[in-house]
Image (tube, rainbow, N blue to C red):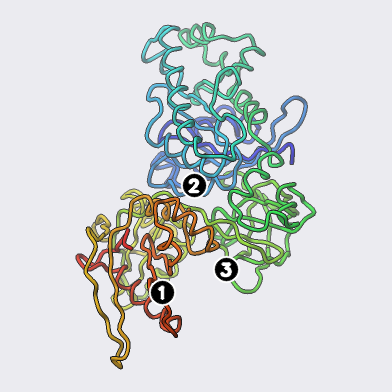
Amino acid sequence: PENIRNIAIAAHVDHGKTTLSDNLLAGAGMISQDTAGEQLAMDTKEDEQERGITIDAANVSMTHEYEDTNHLVNLIDTPGHVDFGGDVTRAMRAVDGALVVVDAVEGAMPQTETVLRQALREGVKPALFINKVDRLISELQEGPQEMQERLLSVISDVNELIRGMAENMDDIPEDWTVSVEDGTVGFGSALYKWGVSMPSMQRTGMDFGDIMELEQNDGREELHERTPLSDVVLDMVCEHFPNPVDAQPRCVPRIWRGDPESELADTMRMVNEDGEVVFMVTDISMDPHAGEIATGRVFSGTLEKGQELYVSGTAGKNRIQSVGLFMGSEREEVDRVPAGNIASVTGLRDAIAGSTVSSVEMTPFESIEHISEPVITKSVEAQSMDDLPKLIETLQQVAKEDPTIQIEINEDTGEHLISGQGELHLEVITQRIRDNQGIPVITGEPIVVFREQPQEASREVEGQSPNRHNKFYITVEPMSQDIVDAIQLGEVSMDMPELERREALQEAGMDKDTSQNVEDIHRTNILIDDTKGIQHLNETMELVLEGLQDALDDGPLAAEPVQGSL
């Protein structure tokens, strides 16, 4: 495990992640050097190639020799488009390092900030690669001085973002800002396959003067030969990103609330391949031949074909049918995958993205929190009623593969609602239903999803039981934004131990007495039970909650969900 590196490549849309991945694959001898940069090997689906954007995170494993030792690099190429941010969040749970790519001309953009936040929230160490440096020379005709100033300003912008986000993180041991001197910043052009960093300049004797000269005099071929991008980036990955043995002791307490003194905690911290199997599923994809493939991180033990494992939240066991590694679009089956790796498994029919799969029953990992909520909805219906059962099955599969999609199925009217992160997100989903599943569907116009919220405290409302012997009094009032944020970020939930939840609510600004009486949290609404000494209330509480949840799902004004009420 000391020689494994699990990394994600993340960036704003069109800053060059997939082109950079091509270079790394070519450097590892997996695709031809000639087509690298144009092949976009990690865009494995047809619609990704057509649109020229990455839609699904794609995994690949490659080897790289660094300081005479062979390293295994498990890489995830993530989408940059804001609509597919859920893939980035899920990928960050499986990796230990994130290579953030920034366009030298555009600089740090909104999505750069988002992917950095997603990485740091999962305790993933960042490094920076400034791409498209050739454009500064050939298009903007910048001199050495201007170029240096521009690159330094990109680095300082990225560092400012990292500092701002890492302030509240107590478990990050060292300073995670990036610097040229440390070798955690690389520069180059993924399209023309050359790259440099401070260590590579010292090794090859190349400096920016030589680069500018070669770039201006059509010497790109020579540049690529003298300082190939893949070597520079993979050396940086091997040297500066933590291996699982360094990363897991820090990341396990962050994402697992189980007993830190237990033997299971020890085997995860030690990345022990002989311990109990613990596997966290971060992605579900469909293969027409193999069926559902669950991809994720092996925290301890060794995955092997035929094992029977528990899936958190479901009864019984699932049997592993095959174990493999993704090589872009292909999946290579192997006999076993030991701890510290990213593996793909078939046979886990009950697993969803975020499931904990293990050989013993255990406290599951914290669920993967997606920062964004669905904001656009459109209706989908099958053209012919014969396709209805198949469409319902496909929509359920879509929701399983992509947890950021919400599906509402109305079996009475045959109309179904899909809610997603944006119009492109929904367009891609409906196109895939048509093309991959062969179901002709009619879609409605996309509409924006609204939320309702009380603006002030209400009067007391009285409700009577059917026999008129019991009366309930309920009030509703707006909740402070800090508490709403804490619920959305997963810092407060009903799954937490009561004491921990109480402290988290008090930290977010709720007073002590109220925090002790939390009965339920539904979406971002909290029910407080302020009754005292009433007998048999627990017998009817389930019905009260059910009624309340119905009322919160269909708000009083426009039948839209209610948020932030207390």
Q: Where is residue 386 drawn, in percent x and y?
A: 36, 75
- Above or below, 33 against 151 in this view is below
Residue at position x 49%, y 22% in the image: 189
- Above or below, 40 against 361 in this view is above
Give the SS element for disc 3: loop
Mark in front: 3 vs 1: 3
Give the SS element for disc 1: helix
Q: Amino acid at mark 2?
A: Thr
Question: Label 1 belongs to which residue?
Answer: 389
- Specify the quadrant of the image occupied by residue 483: bottom left
Foreground pick, 327 / 349: 349
Residue at position x 66%, y 38% in the image: 5
Quarter of the rendering occupied by the C terminus:
bottom left
Question: Label 3 belongs to which residue?
Answer: 313
Quarter of the rendering occupied by the N terminus:
top right
- The crowd level at tag 2 (other Cα within 10 Å; few <14, some 14-19, many 20+) is many
- The crowd level at tag 3 (other Cα within 10 Å; few <14, some 14-19, many 20+) is few
Check whether the beta carbons of the residues at disc 3 and disc 1 lie within 8 A of each other. no
